[in-house]
Amino acid sequence: MKIFKSNRPSTWIAMAMISTTLLARRCIGRPASAFVCHANPSLQCWHTNSHGVATAAIWRNSYKHPLARKNAFLSTYKYGIIHAKFFEASQTAVGMSTTAATASTESSAQDSTLVGIDWVRSSVVSVLNEIFDPAEIAEGAAIAKLDGKKNKKQKKKKKHDDDAAEDEPKEPQMSEDEREAMIQAAIAAAKPFSTVDAMVTPATKPEFGDYQCNAAMSLAKSAGLNPRECAQKIVDGLRPLIGDIMEEPEIAGPGFINLKFKEDYLSRALKTMADDAGGRLAVPQTSYKKKIVVDFSSPNIAKEMHVGHLRSTIIGDTLSNLLSFAGHDVLRLNHVGDWGTQFGMLVEHLRDEFPQALNKETSKNVDLGDLVTLYKAAKKRFDVDDDFKMRSREGVVKLQAGDAEALAAWESLCAASRVEYQKIYDLLSIEGLIERGESFYNPYLNGIIEDLESKGLAVESEGATAVFLEGYTNRDGSPLPMLVRKSDGGFNYATTDLAAIRHRVEMDRSEGGEKADRVLYVTDAGQSQHFDMVFAAAKMAGLVPEAVSLEDVS
């Protein structure tokens, strides 16, 4: 990692742009290697392994300067604007280069507003809807799929000798009426092409240009063309739409379309960015505004934040900033671990060591000291003292039942933890993060179980209630259960996460819900299977509208 120290605002802005580019180019989750502009030597710069903390920390450090803070939210992933090409086209990192300053005054209508991957995708979608009939493509795809199955059966049959084949039961053959019905159903379900069908992505290598369009590869067979013929039709349609901004599209390999910005457009764009008095570097807000929930940080009450929480906090806040700058309505949620069996143990320990914490009036004045030490002391008693263990289990029941003393002690623990977490958040300049812990979703847990059971998804398993999802098994091959209710009646993390999904995407705002279009969970790779199973169960239970996206950012 190269570290540059500078107090020059221009250097700050440039390095903020570079580090944002690195983040947007999916440095998260990959080995950190970047430039850090570090104007304040007292600020910490983290260099870690492949968990991506460094990349996000780089961005945050670059963002500390007031001028950089105005302009550093640019996202290559969203817009495809700031990338190496811009810096190649300029003679200074800030973009006020002689190339930009002396660029041709001739400009297209798009020059006043920068364009990027959204614009390219929209252009491709326009061409697809112009030259192809979605119904015909759907018909071709259905026929290709049916014929493909037929050919596979014929090849499989040839592999068996005649004697073995005679002993096997014959698979039922599809009638012509059934075949035609399936084709007509596909035609009836056909919809106009969307940005998903455009299949435009950032180029995988610099020599391929800036973007790559793979639409021809997926459409060719359904359209009755070979991929290069299909690609040529798309290129012919794109040429008049993008000709002022991009070089002649290049058809590569079997039918990939490579797209590259013109150098003079990049120079003009740099000048437009430099001249933008609004502080956005001419980056437009999205025309597809969405309500997006970003779930990040999520420390546990009465425990210290570890590096995983720091990683989640930094990356989650960075993504939230980028999405907000893009024009989306972003809700930042802190799903703290503030509920569970461990609180019975902690409440009973407070009963003995800090009895004033059990009174709502006096609990606010209680200094619990080092919460980690307190937790360890309570855990040690729980492990060796059977009487304390029994009291702790009873304490959980009291807490869940709403016992006034138990709730007062619990609130003391939560308040003391918030004070410690806020120190970290202040250091990282985390703002707008709303705490909505596990306890918030308690009123919805029974309803989740009832819905899962009514749909036949939740079944009894060894006294507990579990959901078994296809494709998830233990190491021995047995079905892997996703527990939603313990044998003692308690609930699990999966239950709370399902209730959170319902509140975030299904419940109307009039009922207190969020009605989000997209939810990002900034966690770690160790929780990926958990969230895969939770998302699958939520969709099967009908908790997730079709247009909503649930994403595990690990």
Image: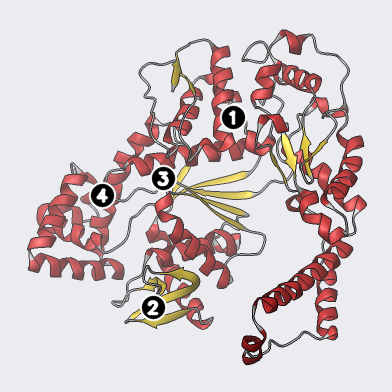
> In front: 109, or 450?
109
Instruction: Left or right? Give the position of 370 relative to 242.
Output: left
Q: Secondary structure at mark 1?
A: helix
Q: Secondary structure at mark 3?
A: loop
Query: Residue 37: image x %, image y %?
Result: 48, 18
Which residue is under mark 1?
A: 21
Residue at (38, 63) in percent of width and height: 493
- Give the Cα distance between marks 1 and 3: 23 Å
Q: Are marks 2 and 1 in contact (CB under 8 Å)?
A: no
Which residue is under mark 4?
A: 302
> In front: 498, or 36?
36
- Give the Cα distance between marks 2 and 4: 29 Å
Q: Secondary structure at mark 4?
A: loop
- Give the Cα distance between marks 2 and 1: 46 Å
Answer few, some or many: residues within 10 Å of disc 3's Cα (few below 14, many 20 plus, some between 14 and 19). many
Numbered disc in front, either 2 or 4: 2
Q: Is residue 257 visible?
A: yes
> In front: 62, or 507?
62
Tell me which label, 3 or 4, sits earlier in the chain: 3
Q: Is residue 122 above or below residue 144?
A: above
Amino acid at the residue labelled 2: Thr
Q: Is residue 46 above or below residue 396?
A: above
